[in-house]
Amino acid sequence: MDSIAGMWELGFFRDALLAGALASVLCGVVGTFVVLKRLVSISGGVAHAAFGGLGAAYWAGWEPRLGAVAVAVASAVGLGFLDGDRARRQDAAIGVLWAVGMAIGLVFLHLTPGYAPNLLGFLFGNILLVSAADLWLAGIADLAVILLLALFGRELVAVAFDEECARLQGVPVRLFSILLLALVALSVVALLQLVGIVLVIALLTIPPLVAQRLVRSLRATVLVSIAICLALTSGGLVLSYLLDWPSGPTMVLLGALALGAAQLRRPRAVRTALAG
Amino acid sequence: MVEAALVAARGLGFRYGGDVVLAGIDLAVQPGDRLAILGPNGGGKSTLVRLLLGLLRPTSGRVVWSRSPRGRRLGYVPQFPAFDRGFPLKVAEMVLQGRLRERGPLRRFRAEDLAAVDAILADLDLEPLRDAFLTELSGGELKRALIARALVGEPELLVLDEPTASLDEASRRKLWARVAALPAACAVLLVTHDLGPGTFAPGRAVLVDRTLEPLSVPDLHQHPLLCGHGHG
């Protein structure tokens, strides 16, 4: 108990908790769309492409996060133009982005004189090293997500559910698909400092997957995903402190446990069909 | 005549890979048309209606609409839905998506949108299922929910792609009664193999099998491509 009480005295620990809370909104909202619209592999590709932007910006002496945001959003928008009939090309493009992004990042890392510990931190994340810039980025991403959901929630849901119906209803499907991917890109970069590029997909997918086992409606799935992500980030943080484990992997493993436990829950009773 | 058409196909063609699915299709759909589209499996019927709706891009020719995309009021019941039934939506929420055009961007659904959903759910005997999730529906119930979504927006063009597959007899009768009661200006395109008496009353009919040829409506019930007739 003394250990836990002692944690609260630490400023960086409180910052880490705040970062976890801000990230939970992204995980809950954007993660739900990622799972429902099956954007998991796109998110992975964007996350790894972002590493190229990080490396290039770091080498050029710019703010690495800006490089990551620029490349992640550009990648997401590019992939958004390879949908529909070109889905197979999109799948291949994700694979290329995934590998080339990492390769570019590692080459720039190699070209940058000296050791680049911050950049490696983006690979595996360390929420305890979260900076004011990270908190601002997560906060801005939260605001962007909440604002867009408030303004265009119905259109985003329509596009995520059934693009054909949305198109026939006059919804600009490509615009909203790209907007959704841009939100995924922004979220991925905002989450990098917490769990890193390698593990970011887990934080976007595990909370909605657990939530789907617990609740049924879309609204409830989003809200429960936010709560689960909050529990994973803060619980993982405390656990990593107590066990002296790295924070990102601890959060992900805690999430895996939660997902396993949720799978043990009996499937919800399904209404018997009224008609044959 | 083509100039007055709601939508027209001009020299329309579609290839999938190296295979020609449709070639040289000319077809004009007028307001109030009741058009039956018949043809063998794989003949290109569904492709044709999807091209007319703008859901596919033609590989040759073009589709000409009398209105801009924003001005069109379309209802579509696909042969196979393109969405994931695991998506956490209730029947009423899905049907409400058929009123997105009414609402327009940045505006909430209004009381008349919700009333329209209530009315169509009642019409198609879906009221008991309004709060059911899509995963809970049988195939026939889902088809009825899709029909409700297509009708709720009061379309000027209603496209029904084999809508009676998986519907029981009572639901079929409901559907045809509802289609018969549509406003006279609403054009209906029906892709079907099932055109018995007391079902859809087409004003004209076409056969689509890579190309398009008109069919005589009075002789339609004897057509070998319709269920229960010919050699099957």
Image (spheres, rainbow, N blue to C red):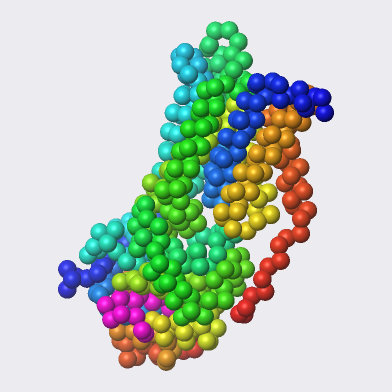
Snapshot quadrant of residue B58:
bottom left
Looking at the image, residue A238 sits to the left or right of residue B216; the answer is: right
Task: Tell me what residue is drawn at x 51 percent, y 83 percent.
Answer: B171
Instruction: Please tell me which residue is depicted at 58% across the width and 35% down the height of the picture.
Output: A23
Left or right relative to A167: residue A238 = right
Q: Residue at x 60, y 48 (%)?
A: A223
Quarter residue B84 falls in: bottom right
Percent of width and height locating residue B62: 26, 60
Q: Is B189 within the magenta? A: yes
Foreground of the two, A18 or B194: A18
Q: Position of residue A154 (x, y in %)?
A: 45, 55
Q: What is the x, y in percent for residue B212?
A: 31, 73
Q: Residue A35: say if magenta.
A: no
Q: Which residues are magenta?
A: B180-192
Q: Is A147 placed above or below A106 here?
A: below
Q: Is residue A211 above or below residue A201?
A: below
Q: Front-most of B65 and A184?
A: A184
Q: Is residue B21 visible?
A: no
Is A10 situated above or below A21?
above
Quarter of the image with the C terminus of chain A in it: bottom right
* Residue A200 rendering spot, x and y as whole percentages: 61, 34
- Horizontally, is A262 left or right of B17 in the view? right
- For the N terminus of chain A, the quadrant is top right
Look at the picture and state if B159 lies above or below A228: below
